[in-house]
Image (tube, rainbow, N blue to C red):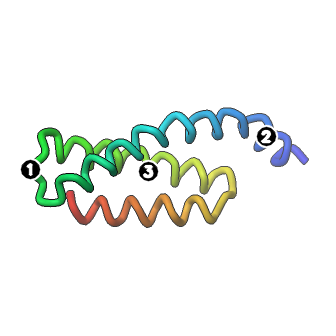
Amino acid sequence: MSDTFDKLSVLDSFIEEVNSYLPEIESNLESLAQSPSGTMPGYMDAIEETYRRTHTIGGSASMMDFPGLAHVAHGMEDILGDVL
């Protein structure tokens, strides 16, 4: 019972955190798609920031027991990590 209560008590914070990261991730991915050769100023910064955000989302999703979201986030993290 306490595990359920604890998860419910932080669910709003989790959703807020994820939602705060999504616009930045989307913007970074759109910018990166426009410069696939890596010539865009801030190219590596965008990759690193997106990597950090997806890592955080994946870890938080795992702790909140959202395996689907965790799987997608960790998959993105793996791809971005290969670029770094």
Quadrant of the image occupied by residue 23: top left
Q: Residue furthest right?
A: 1
Query: Where does the image place residue 15, in percent across and percent down from the top left?
Result: 65, 39
Disc 3 residue crowd, few under 14, some 14–19, many 20+, Cα 10 Å: many
Query: Where does the image place residue 84, in percent across and percent down from the top left?
Result: 20, 57
Q: Nearer the viewer, residue 32 or 73?
A: 32
**Residue holding disc 1:** 39
Q: Earlier in the sequence, mark 3 or mark 2?
A: 2
**Residue holding disc 2:** 6
- Which amino acid type is marked by label 1? Thr
Q: Which mark is residue 54?
A: 3
- The residue tagged with tag 2: helix, strand or loop? helix
Q: Earlier in the sequence, mark 1 or mark 2?
A: 2
Which of pointers 1 and 3 indicates the residue nearer the eye? 1
Q: At 12% from the left edge and 54% from the top edge, which residue is drawn?
A: 38
Query: Where does the image place residue 6, in percent across and percent down from the top left?
Result: 79, 40
